[in-house]
Image: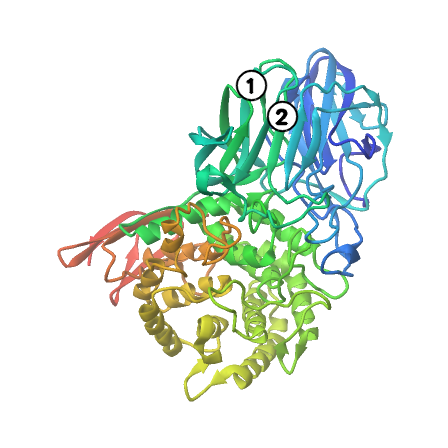
């Protein structure tokens, strides 16, 4: 452990043997007249703690995932030689109410999590260690003073009833196992900084009673009714030794067979078996409930083989409240709102915004940066991003400034622009949403170092490569073959970030840096135009796959090109873009007032539209427009932000942050009769409702106190007051 101020004193890391799947560590102690008891605790990978057989918290999958300690990065599928920052989070719990006068027992059960994930090997060997371990300090306040109990090697450990556990595959629980207590081992101390946990832990958010749909051979098939993340909890009174087998999928095939195609079945694990999520429970003859403890699954359908008396689905994800509402008569808009929220929540675990909750489960910086502004607007996610931004920073190479494609680093491919630029784009979104310059100050130098890194990956003013042997993507998952030049996309991101750094430098008193940014902006602008701009046709890269939207977004063009984009997509009526430009395109169109074009895209049908997903009974957003691979990827849904900034018109005025100064400037399409919704700003709820009646539009706008608000529509402007504002135009 790096020398830091933490409460663990002389505590030792302790555990069982390398072979044990999920050990339980026991510490017995006496306590009398305790006025307050505080438990400081962590474990690698996950832990669950109980005192006197009562849970110390409802948190799941803690500590939150991080880049725990050094690994051999050369064993990754895309080898790296970076030097990272390593951090282990610890949790703090008030356990006073759990103590008894006299004898007490602290039990810590450990699970593999990402720390010892050795089955999925598509990214190479990415696990951290062979042996699970725990560290704790228990502080007891009494009338005689403070007593501190540390993990010190006097504990015992035993095997638990979990006999197999893998984050990507599932668990096997054998209730007949009765572990024999043995002395713990004192284990090596990780080379990492201990940090009190920030972020948002996972919890059971809600419970669903699934619908029985029939049998496939002897297996009972159930439909949850929506694509969720969590586990299935079953009750059984079957005789001892009875095995109950379960499997999970997003889709059904003919004859009610589970279809594993979208969740990773093509991935072959270290054991040689396909990556198919399964759980198994072996009974001990008592009447009891079973559920997996150290994994979650992403699924809508599941099968049960074996006798169960009852079951329920536990929906589990990071405890991030949804703080937005939206309604309209548009099937496309309403589906986008509902499906995006469900998809995003399904992909929030361990304070990491993942790409999918089953096949990969990784915090891809590309997916994460695209969705971050939307999540911050629609959900109470500030603590969540406090932690994930730190993950991005910890994954930056301390020598050359390289930023990883996943945060925390778990392998995966990506690119220098849409992925690595998350180190600028996510803190900037945080700054805009919350008005917090402290985040800018915290991330400013890492941002600058990444800009320097991009310069080393450039030739003739264009970003042309990433790490040797790794990926260098531009756009990703377009509906047809991706034809956008990779250097064009990456250099547009480089240019955009330079412009944002000018804004952030002003915010924190770093004006002396601005001339260098402006010089770089001029250089990048010239390079992009020289290589990709057709002056005669006034287009970049022939306008393919949203290229001109990239140009407007990056500051290379303005209103005239935005107007041509609107004309093009009004006629096309579907997206031809990958996930990066889908968000950028809708943002550009709304910025310049083209709500009709955005409505046409969001209400379109066929491949390249959200209603195509809905027509295939999707309840979450797909990874690709065609529906191949995962059916639970949030990245395309980032454009749901336009429901609020566009159709409802809730926009911060240029140059302002934290919703201190806003304008309500709705982009009202000709073919949309009403819309209503709300978001939660730092000052309180902002709600907008409009409805067309007898040739006019009736507006109701609620503004919290502490916001300077103006209404802008149809060439008119009017000041809005604190509270409800109602009028017709």
State the quadrant of the C terminus. bottom left
Residue at the extreme bottom of the image, as rendered: 536
Q: Secondary structure at mark 1?
A: strand
Asked if marks 2 and 1 touch (Cβ < 8 Å), the reply is yes
Residue at 32% over, 60% down:
599
Residue 139: percent from left, percent from top: 74, 25
Q: Which residue is mark 1?
A: 236
Residue 713: percent from left, percent from top: 27, 63
Q: Secondary structure at mark 2?
A: strand
Q: Which residue is mark 2?
A: 281
Q: Residue 463: in sight, yes or no?
A: yes
Q: Residue 705: in sight, yes or no?
A: no
Quadrant in the rendering for residue 48: top right
Quadrant in the rendering for residue 645: bottom left
**Residue toward you, 315 or 379:** 315
Residue 690: percent from left, percent from top: 25, 52
């Amino acid at each position: 452990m790096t020398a830091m101020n933490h409460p663990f004193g002389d505590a030792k890391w302790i555990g069982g043997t390398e072979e044990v799947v999920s050990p339980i560590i026991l510490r017995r102690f006496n306590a009398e007249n305790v006025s307050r008891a505080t438990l400081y605790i962590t474990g690698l990978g996950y832990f669950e703690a109980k005192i006197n057989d009562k849970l110390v918290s409802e948190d799941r999958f803690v500590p939150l995932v991080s880049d725990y300690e050094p690994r051999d990065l050369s064993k990754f599928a895309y080898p790296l030689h970076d030097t990272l920052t390593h951090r282990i989070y610890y949790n703090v719990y008030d356990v006073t109410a759990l103590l008894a006068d006299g004898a007490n027992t602290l039990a810590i059960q450990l699970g593999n999590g990402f720390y010892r994930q050795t089955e999925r090997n598509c990214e190479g060997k990415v696990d951290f260690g062979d042996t699970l371990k725990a560290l704790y300090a228990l502080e007891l306040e009494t009338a005689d003073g403070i007593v501190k109990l540390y993990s010190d090697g006097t504990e015992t450990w035993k095997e638990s009833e979990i006999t197999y556990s893998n984050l990507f595959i599932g668990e096997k629980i054998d209730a007949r196992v009765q572990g024999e207590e043995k002395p713990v081992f004192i284990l090596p101390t990780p080379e990492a900084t201990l940090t009190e946990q920030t972020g948002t832990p996972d919890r059971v958010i809600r419970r669903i009673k699934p619908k029985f749909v029939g049998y496939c051979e002897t297996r009972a098939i159930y439909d949850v009714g929506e694509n969720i993340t969590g586990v299935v909890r079953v009750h059984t009174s079957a005789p001892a030794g009875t095995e109950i087998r379960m499997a999970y999928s997003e889709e059904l095939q003919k004859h009610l067979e589970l279809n594993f195609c979208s969740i990773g079945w093509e991935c072959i694990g270290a054991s040689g078996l396909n990556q198919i999520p399964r759980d198994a429970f072996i009974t001990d003859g008592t009447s009891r409930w079973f559920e997996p403890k150290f994994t979650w699954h992403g699924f809508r359908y599941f099968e049960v083989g074996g006798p169960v008396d009852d079951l329920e689905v536990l929906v589990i994800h990071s405890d991030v409240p949804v703080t937005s509402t939206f309604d309209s008569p548009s099937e496309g808009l309403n589906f986008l709102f509902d499906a995006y929220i469900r998809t995003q929540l399904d992909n929030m675990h361990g304070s990491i915004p993942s790409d999918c909750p089953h096949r990969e489960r990784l915090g891809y910086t590309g997916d994460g940066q695209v969705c971050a502004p939307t999540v911050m607007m629609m959900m109470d996610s500030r603590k969540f991003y406090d932690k994930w931004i730190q993950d991005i920073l910890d994954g930056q190479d301390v020598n050359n400034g390289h930023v990883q494609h996943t945060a925390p680093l778990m392998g995966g491919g990506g690119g220098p622009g849409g992925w690595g630029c998350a180190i600028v784009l996510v803190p900037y979104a945080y700054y805009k949403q919350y008005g917090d310059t402290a985040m800018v100050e915290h991330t400013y130098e890492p941002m600058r170092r990444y800009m320097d890194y991009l310069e080393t990956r450039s030739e003739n003013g264009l970003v042309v490569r990433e790490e040797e042997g790794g990926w260098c993507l531009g756009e990703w998952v377009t509906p047809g073959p991706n034809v956008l030049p990779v250097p064009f996309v990456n250099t547009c991101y480089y240019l955009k970030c330079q412009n944002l750094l000018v804004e952030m430098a002003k915010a924190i008193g770093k004006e002396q840096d601005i001339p260098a940014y402006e010089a770089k902006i001029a250089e990048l602008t010239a390079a992009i135009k020289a290589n990709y701009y057709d002056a005669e046709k006034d287009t970049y890269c022939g306008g393919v796959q949203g290229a001109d939207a990239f140009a407007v977004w990056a500051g290379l063009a303005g209103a005239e090109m935005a107007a041509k984009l609107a004309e093009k997509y009004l006629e096309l009526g579907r997206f031809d873009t990958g996930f990066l430009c889908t968000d950028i395109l809708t943002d550009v169109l709304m910025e310049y007032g083209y709500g009709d074009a955005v409505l046409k895209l969001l209400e379109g049908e066929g491949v390249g539209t959200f209603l195509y997903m809905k027509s295939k009974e999707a309840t979450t957003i797909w990874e690709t427009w065609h529906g191949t691979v995962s059916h639970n990827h949030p990245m395309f849904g980032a454009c749901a932000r336009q429901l609020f900034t566009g159709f409802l018109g809730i926009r911060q005025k240029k140059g302002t942050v934290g919703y201190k100064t806003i304008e309500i400037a709705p982009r009202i399409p000709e073919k949309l009769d009403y819309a209503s919704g709300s978001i939660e700003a730092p000052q309180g709820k902002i709600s907008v409702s409009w409805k067309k009646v007898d040739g006019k539009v009736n507006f109701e706008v609620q503004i919290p106190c502490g916001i300077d608000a103006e209404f802008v529509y149809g060439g008119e402007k009017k000041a809005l007051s604190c509270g409800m504002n109602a009028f017709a135009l």
